[in-house]
Amino acid sequence: MKALITGATGFIGSHLAEHLHEKGYELRALIRPSSDTKWLKHLPVEYVTGSFSDIASLVPAVRDVDVIYHVAGVVAARDRKGFFDGNQLATANLMDAVIEANPSLARFVHVSSQAACGPSPSADRPVDESMPMRPITTYGESKAAAEREVIERMSVIPSTIVRPPAVYGPRDVGVYTFFQVVGRGLAPLIGFDRKLVSLIHARDLVRGFVMAGEASVAEGETYFISSERFYDWKEVGEITARVMGRRRPRYLNVPHPIIFGVAAVNGFMGRFMKKPPILDFEKGRDLTQGFWTCSVEKASRDLGFEESLTIEAGIEDTVGWYRHHGWL
């Protein structure tokens, strides 16, 4: 089996490449001229350079592969068009290239996000695949639009949609900041209410992707690939401090108005920066939600998916990697 991975040079994509290699797949990666392939140097990967804005350039990448894992996407952009070009249009063009050059593709696995569905309505009601999509940010709207592009083409291309929640693990630069702060004896908490989150290690996540990509029952379906448990950041902070050999962290509650105030300033300053800010108003809205939880029941029932790493083992693995590479 030969697999094409988009976004293979990134955090999740590189873990997926490793897992597919372990399972005996041949690997092909769609990259940009500026892509850094350092996380793939140890793997036998065929590289194809292309652009999601140019369908013709995608044809050599999609031709003669058995399965495509579309991981690439835009998580930060200066404007609405940037999000929709990087998520919706990119997905549509990639699938149209498949229709043109590889109509016998066995499976197209589209990696979406819980952001496409939105946060949970309450602590005891995690979102599941039966719920309508109610994204609360432009990023989430663009991921929902990308899902609709996949659904429109499911009658032509056998497809599966997978939705990750918050993800951590080696090479991550998102949750990494939280690990840095805990290492200094602090644990920031957004607001004063308890917030719950689904949280999964990257290796368990990509294993779930491949289970969905290989299962015949998953064709035409959508799955949350997630942790069975829900966590609050206080618990995650205590586990992280213990793994690091630190004393219990001092918790710092950051009120929601401060989050939005900083986000507003960052959003304004971001107009004059080369890269969009990490924290803007929409990210602030994201962070202040009470419940980013999702149900893994369907993936468990259909695919037999379950986590192999406890939160303690996952954090120990992640901290060990950060230390080995000088990040902590």
Image: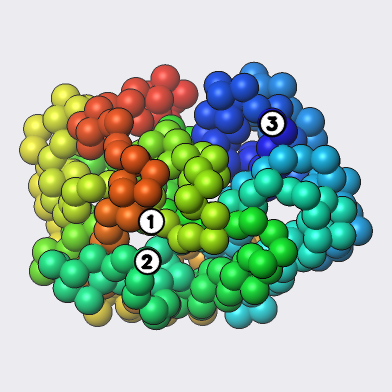
Q: Is residue 324 above or below residue 112?
A: above
Q: Which residue is mark 1?
A: 224
Contact between labelled residues 1 and 2, with CB atoms less than 8 Å apart: yes
* Marked residue nearer the N-terminal end (3 or 1): 3
Q: Amino acid at mark 3?
A: Met
Residue projecting furthest to the front: 217
Cα separation, mark 2 vs mark 1, equals 7 Å
Horizontal side of residue 152 vs 121, given as left or right: right
Q: Residue at x 17, y 63 (%)?
A: 195
Across and down, in percent, residue 283 comes to: 41, 70
Q: Which residue is mark 3?
A: 1
Q: Nearer the viewer, residue 293 or 235?
A: 293
Q: Which residue is mark 2?
A: 129
Contact between labelled residues 3 and 2, with CB atoms less than 8 Å apart: no
Q: Quadrant of the C terminus?
A: top left
* Marked residue nearer the N-terminal end (2 or 1): 2
Local secondary structure at mark 3: loop
Instruction: Report how many numbered discs are placed on residues in the image.
Output: 3
Across and down, in percent, residue 159 comes to: 60, 57
Give the color scheme: rainbow, by chain, secondary structure or one colour: rainbow
Q: Residue at x 13, y 40 (%)?
A: 238
Q: Quadrant of the N terminus?
A: top right
For the residue carrying disc 1, how many other residues have a C-alpha within 10 Å: few (<14), some (14-19), or many (20+)? many
Please tell me in which quadrant of the rendered image residue 254 appears.
bottom left
Q: Residue at x 65, y 74 (%)?
A: 152
Q: Amino acid at mark 1?
A: Phe
* Marked residue nearer the N-terminal end (2 or 3): 3
